[in-house]
Amino acid sequence: MNSLLLLGSIPKLPLANWIDGFVDWLVQFTGFFNAVTNFIGSINNAFQWVFDALPIWLFIVLILALTYYVNRDKQNWSLLIFEFLGLLLIWNLNYWRDMTQTLTLVLTSSLIALVIGIPLGILMAKSHIAEVILKPILDFMQTMPAFVYLIPAVALFGIGMVPGIVASVIFAMPPTVRMTNMGIREVPDELIEAADSFGSTEWQKLFKVELPIAKTSLMAGVNQSMMLSLSMVVIASMIGAMGLGTKVYFAVGRNDAGNGFAAGLAIVILAIILDRLTQSLTRTRRKN
């Protein structure tokens, strides 16, 4: 009882005020955040321009051709049929534009997560100090509720696709960092010693030995990051990110179960297609 009374007498830490002050301090650097917004927006607009320029039938053909190519050793006809019927259903439901906007958000956030996450994973694998520092940060990024990321994202980047992408990157990047670190650390010591015996430099060992062997783990991280980015679609719609998430968000507000289920089904179809494609790239093929 005495310990509880003593604990209650300790003044409350002004943690919320500290965070607010830090965000207000960051807002002062408007030039930097405007530059970041323009850079991310240009990547997003480039993806969207490509998807808008492609006829729908050609987009479907390209997806089917890519799926057939990456699964040519297995000839997974069931996946091809599912993709064909699923994309036709999205087209028929008039969700095609929303689907491409969602795909743009996922691809942009996944690309940025890879560009940042893979070097961080390599750094963790090469430096024990970096691993000790980054591990708790990654734990924090993965366990913090995704909604919390929307608040500073809006304060720093406004509303629209860019803050949704930034929140998605923060939420989706940890798997790429962790899997890259794990893949490089699991490279057999015998191969490292063999590379050293041939006089390989650190860069040669990294690009010719470690990364190729760690490819399976790295691609598994890419798959997880992409799925986490897709899971942020509905959440990002709350701050102006367009796409299928907006349809679901509006349906929830209107208690419209039919349109909400239809838009959710379109998200599921897109998620399955992306998941199967990245899994096919992860799978190591045997040469005949």
Image (tube, rainbow, N blue to C red):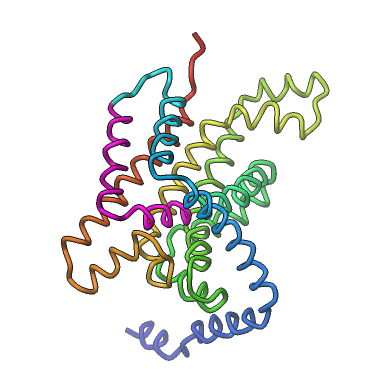
Residue 88 part of the magenta segment: yes
**Residue 283, placed above or below residue 106:** above
Question: Whole-percent x and y of residue 97?
Answer: 38, 56
Q: Position of residue 106 (x, y in %)?
A: 46, 53
Residue 284 location in percent, x, y? 49, 23
Q: Quadrant of the N terminus?
A: bottom left
Q: Residue furthest right?
A: 199
Identity of the residue drawn at 47% across and 76% down: 151
* In the foreground, 88 or 226: 88
The correct choice, above or below, for 47 with respect to 249 in the image is: above
Decide which of 23, 164 is in the foreground and name it.
Answer: 164
Residue at image x 40%, y 41%?
Answer: 274
Number of numbered discs overlaid on the protein picture: 0
Q: Which residues are magenta?
A: 78-106
Q: Residue at x 68, y 78 (%)?
A: 29
| In the displayed structure image, the side of residue 132 where residue 246 appears, left or right | left
Q: Main secondary structure of the magenta part?
A: helix
Q: Name the spot of residue 210 as percent of width and height, x first.
A: 65, 30
**Along the viewing direction, whichever of 218 and 40 lies nearer the viewer:** 40
In the drawing, does residue 81 fall left or right of residue 55? left
Q: Is residue 184 above or below residue 22?
A: above
> Quarter-wise, where is residue 2 in the image?
bottom left
> Magenta segment: does it hold 11?
no
